[in-house]
Amino acid sequence: MRRTTTARRGLAAAALTLSLGLALAGCSGDSGDDPSPSASSTSSANPADTAALAEVTVEGEPGSKPTITLPSTPFEVTALTVRVVDEGDGDEIEEGQTLSIQTTAVSGADGSELGDTYSTAPEKIVADDQLLPELHDALVGQQVGVRILFAIPGTADATSTAAPVTNVVVGEVVEAKDTPKPLERAEGEAVTPAAGLPTVTLDADGKPSITPVDAAAPTELVVQPLITGTGAPVTEDQTLTVNYTGWLWDGTQFDSSWDRGEPATFALTGVIPGWTQGLTGQTVGSQVLLVIPPDMAYGEQGSGESVPPNSTLIFVVDILAAS
């Protein structure tokens, strides 16, 4: 069901999209040993990067959009580098909590502003082992209100002669809440599906199987709730935890998180359009049958050997959590 092979750990192009959920993909580095660094601490594998980030100034009152001033341009680092610039005075940030973070960013090329979230809504991330270790270690053990400064090195583009650009971001934690534990399976009110759809059967653990129908595949997306959960409606910008199984229209199974023994977690913006459109608006706890035409799945190219070109796909999805 994934459009690309992205992991939840990939946080990044933060400065370009100001989305911590996408911002640091592909960046890596060694994390420090101290889970609660002081306001002067910096995390980087490269001493030169640490020294460079120490020269960046961050000004502004807590709770308001800060001003980032680079010592010179172009400003560059070789690896993700993080510095705690202001300690907070709220509750301690604990492992596994969901954090709301306001961000603002500038380009290392010339110091120009790339945007901020202070005029809209904070980003949300989970402070667990899926977070990049540099960010995890800079946040867990600090207090709400903490402001971190981090620099993200650019990635070279083989099709361009332009030099990679480092982006510099300030993140301010404005809230930390305990992350709800994912459900083990869909739970709620059963729904009688429309006629003409594959029949879904659940085993004792909730794992689905289907009986396909002997009919032409639909050409439009079909979204059929089988169980309506009592949780909050899913929004397109969220990260979901789900169990799912996928079949071709003829009933041939090609993928299943149930068979792998653990749920899948992914950003709803990082999957095929049929999933994004079909699951947005469904409630946590729901089980949803999706019938996805090729143009909202893998189209003419298919996906590997298991999904031929122009395949109509069937999925049964249990929505276990959304954050």
Image (tube, rainbow, N blue to C red):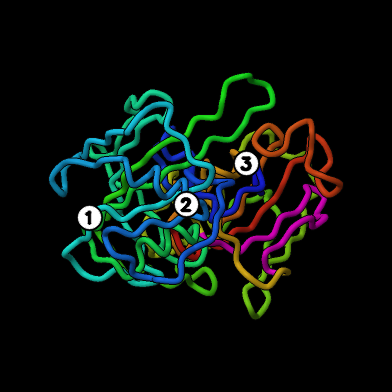
Give the magenta-colored segment's residue range: 241-258
- The residue indicated by pointer 3 is 272
Please identify the dominant SS of the magenta region. strand
Q: Nearer the viewer, mark 3 or mark 1?
A: 1
Rounded to the nearest angstrom, the CA distance separating label 2 from label 1 is 21 Å
Task: Point out the residue furthest to the bottom here.
Answer: 204
Residue at the farthest left position: 61
Where residue 172 appears, as percent x and y from the top left, is 27, 51
**Is residue 203 depicted above or below 319 in this figure?**
below
The answer to whether residue 125 is above or below residue 217 is: below
Q: Nearer the viewer, residue 133 or 246?
A: 133
The residue depicted at 26 percent of the width and 59 percent of the height is: 39
- Mark nearest the camera among 2 and 1 is 2
Q: Please give the residue where the numbered disc 2 appears in the rendered image.
A: 47
- Where in the figure is residue 260, as x and y percent of width and height? 71, 69
Q: Nearer the viewer, residue 249 or 179?
A: 179
